[in-house]
Every structure is written in C-alpha cells, then in structure tokens.
Amino acid sequence: MEFERFVEDIKNNNWNVFGVEVYENGELTHSFGDTNENLHPIYSATKTIVSIAVGILYDEGKIDLKRCILDYLPKEKVEKMSDEQKDAFSIITVERLLTMSVEGLPFVAEGDSFIDFALSCKLTDPKKRGFNYSNINTYLVCVALSEIIGGDLAEFIEYRIFKPLGIDRYEYGRCPEGYFYGSSRMKLSVNELSRIGLLLYNNGVYNGQRIVSEEYVKMATSVQQMNREGGYGYFIWKYKDGFSINGKLKQKCYVLPNRGIMITYLCHIEDDSCPLKESMEKWLLSE
C-alpha cells in the first residue's frame, strides 16, 4: 500500500476530497485531510444506515422482510389507495424495496405528501425483479420503520446505532410530513462514516458491542439483486470481493473483509469519471 502516492494524486489533480481514512485489520493506519472536524453530505450513504436500522428490528422479530410493505405503512394511507394500486403493491415486499428491485418507481418523490406520491406510482410490472434505483424505496422503508417503532426513526437511529458507535454529531432531513427521510440529506464526518463501515466489517459488532446480527449483515452485504455494477444487497453495493457504501459526488466506504482493508473518503466531485477510484485501487489495493 502506497498511501502517500494516493495523496499526491489527490493534490496534483486538485480533486475536491475532504478527507480519507484507511483501516487495516480494523485499525486506522492512514488518514488525510478533514476526517473529524467537519460534517459533510453523505447523500445516499444514508441508505446503508437505514438498512442497519432494518436489521435491528429484524433481529427483534418486529419486521418480516418477506411481508408486503403495505402491512407496515399507515393504515389511513393504504386505505386511500385505489384497488388497482393495492393489487400492484400487494406483492411488493420489504425485501424488494431493500434491493431496489421494483420497476416503475421514479427516482424521487414530489409534492406535499411523499407517501401519497409513492403509493400512487404506476408500477411497470410488479412481479418482475429488475434493478431500479429509487429514493422512494428507502423512504417507504423509513415510514414503515417509524410505524413499527411507534416513534421517530431519527431518535431510534441515534440511540440504537449512533450512540454505541460514539457518533454524537450529525445532521439529517425529513419529508414534508415529518418522517426521517433516509434516502439522503444526512451529514457525517469521514471518521463517522468509517464507523458505519467498521460495524459492517466486524459483522455487526463495534468495540465489543453487538448492534446488529451477523445473520443480517451477511444478507445485507451479499448480492441479492444483480445490476450492471456487479450486484446490490440491502441498500449496500457489491464491490470486488467485499462491498461498499456509496453516495453521489464520490462519497465512499469500501469494505474488503477478506483483505482486512477498509477505505473511506468524502468528496465533492461532480463529473462521472473515475480517476479518483482508479488511483485508490492502484495505490491502496494493488497486490
């Protein structure tokens, strides 16, 4: 591993990287830039945190991933749906949402009620499993979790995930109806996103404390739905022989348990090119 060469590439190319951390066998070995001081948008990496919340409730027997999502949503919202929409959504399970395998959902919800918008979307073919990346999937899961716990999902995440991870500074967003949004709109530091990665790297344990079961972590980080990027788990992406937590504009936490390596960086890089990733793989992952 040649970390300094990676840092040189960042500096020489003026890549807008806020900070980088590298962990080897669970220990921080290299860092660059702002890894602790400031919070930065993590965008869709927020989805992985929602997945962990799902896992906690799954472990407690409070959510069945094979049940229809409508079973967990507010009854008054479901009752407003047309018979056609109820039929279409009747075969959409929690697991289908977690794996982004519902065709027909647009990327984002709109209007004053994201729930009503989501439940009025015309599904292309409800029975067909095709990868369709949509923030609506995560949002509906967040509403379901809020209903299951009978309270604020943000507070649940704070006490059941962030507190045991030692994360005491974060920002998040809500939908117009007040639910924790969950698809994006969260800010963490580089080091705090690394803690999420370490929790998954250690199969649900952080600093000796079990937060979510190994069973759920294995399911969430395994390929459950194929896509052109190589596969998708439960709001977690397949990456090489491990997995990754991803957000737009190059927010990344690459977790490679078999190699004992984890790499986190937060950035603001708007183009779709991959030189940062290529440099990371060349200097940090090459054998």
Image: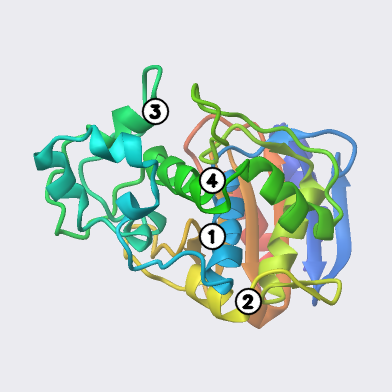
Residue denoted by label 1: 54
Classify mark 1: helix, strand or loop: helix
Real-space CA distance between mark 4 and mark 1, rounded to the nearest whole angstrom:
11 Å
- Which residue corresponds to mark 4? 146
- What is the x, y in percent for residue 134? 36, 41
Up-down relation of residue 33 to residue 218 (above or below): above
| Of the image marks 1 and 2, the number of the one nearer the N terminus | 1
| Residue type indicated by callout 1 | Val
Q: Residue furthest top?
A: 112
Q: Where's residue 98, x and y in %?
A: 41, 57
Image quarter hosting the N terminus? bottom right
Quadrant in the picture for the C terminus: bottom right
Q: Are marks 4 and 1 in contact (CB under 8 Å)?
A: no
Within 10 Å of disc 1 (Cα), the crowding (few <14, some 14-19, many 20+) is many
Q: Quadrant of residue 24?
A: bottom right
The residue to which callout 2 is attached is 213
